[in-house]
Amino acid sequence: MVQAYILVQTEVGMADQVSEDVSALEGVVRVDIVTGPYDVVVLTEAASADHLRTLVVSRVQRVAGITRTLTCSILNA
């Protein structure tokens, strides 16, 4: 099992909607709205690195209102 945090920047005023939309995606474990340079932090889980890539590129990054993502793989899970 591969886990990663995805740090998400959103368009102004879109953090709530992005959070709601991302939380409905398969493989998303937890979604938090945060302060700082990123607006939303997403904890994801996938069967492999390839599945994680598909989750990030084909699903998360396509959510309306997202302007940028940064994926941080978890090494000690």
Image (cartoon, rainbow, N blue to C red):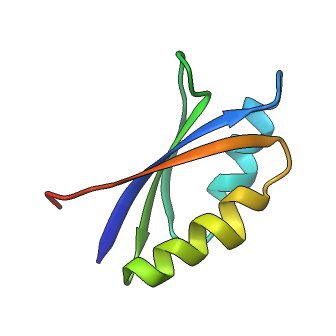
| Residue ID at (49%, 81%) | 51
- Image coordinates of residue 55 in percent, x first then y, are 58, 71
| Residue ID at (19%, 58%) | 75
- Image coordinates of residue 32 in percent, x first then y, are 53, 36
Q: Is residue 12 above or below residue 47?
A: above
Quadrant where the N terminus sits is bottom left
- Image coordinates of residue 27 in percent, x first then y, are 51, 70
- Image coordinates of residue 29 in percent, x first then y, are 46, 59
Query: In terms of image quadrants, where is residue 38?
Result: top right
Say how many tags the image has. Answer: 0
**Left or right: 4, with 17 as reference point:** left
**Left or right: 29, with 13 as reference point:** left
Query: In terms of image quadrants, where is residue 19?
Result: top right
Quadrant where the C terminus sits is bottom left
Q: Is residue 4 above or below residue 10?
A: below
| Residue ID at (67%, 54%) | 22
Q: Residue furthest top?
A: 36
Q: Is residue 22 above or below residue 54?
A: above
**Left or right: 15, with 53 as reference point:** right
